[in-house]
Image: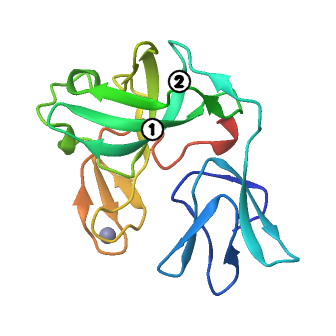
Amino acid sequence: MNKDKIVLPGEQVSTSEELLPGDGTFEEDGIIRASRVGTYYIDEKHKRAIVKPLTSIPVELKRGDIVLALVESVRSNMVIADVIHSIGKNRSISGDTNGTLRVSEISNSYVKDPSTEYAPGDIIRAKVTQVKPSVQLATKDRDLGVIKAMCTKCRHSLVRKDNLLICENCKNKEKRKTADDYGNYDLHKL
Ligand SMILES: [Zn+2]
């Protein structure tokens, strides 16, 4: 992978054969992955993979912000997602980042069960509809929804084909509420 590339949590940056996992990364089954949104670089001297935070000055979430959030759990009537980035702000986020996405706010179509649309580990682009007393998110618009998802069986990236996401490794087919630029988003516009 190229140096100085912006990466998302869970994204593969290197392998344990090439480098050691450094700050902002973790190793899993021989793969080194990013643990935060940031810029990937290699500490050549110590042969470490590093993901630096985009900047150090934090920003507070506001209603109307468009954010990236990592889906942590999917319940019967809501999705819990940790807000990891505020788009266009290039800063880390201060305060409460624990967002809730109610089933009625997922899509313009009727959704009965959130687990048909999102899975833990998905990275979604969402709109902040409330900040206090709790962070509430919505993904109804076309440009909102999953921008990156991993196969729930083998953790390889899923590729969009028509209305489904397909794992090129194990051929598993999955469904998501995808953003219209799924798989083709521009990380430099984070
Ligand atoms: Zn798979």
Percent coordinates x, y for residue 177 in the rendering: 30, 38
Give the residue displayed 28% in from the left and 35% down from the top: 79
Q: Which residue is mark 1?
A: 82
Q: Residue furthest bottom?
A: 17
Q: Is residue 8 above or below residue 185?
A: below
- Residue 82 appears left or right of 12: left
Q: CA distance from mark 1 to mark 2?
A: 13 Å
Q: Residue furthest right?
A: 45
- Residue 168 lies in quadrant: bottom left
> Image quadrant of ligand 1?
bottom left
Give the residue displayed 15% in from the left and 25% down from the top: 110
Percent coordinates x, y for residue 33 in the rendering: 57, 65
Dot 1 or dot 2, earlier in sequence: 2
- Residue 112 appears left or right of 29: left
Q: Which is more toward the observer, 4 or 45?
A: 45
Query: Can you tell which mark lies on residue 66?
Result: 2
- Residue 153 lies in quadrant: bottom left
Give the residue displayed 73% in from the left and 63% down from the top: 50
Please state, as top left, top right, bottom left or bottom right, where the C terminus lies in the image.
Answer: top right
Identify which amino acid the numbered label 2 is placed on: Ile
Give the residue displayed 48% in from the left and 39% down from the top: 181
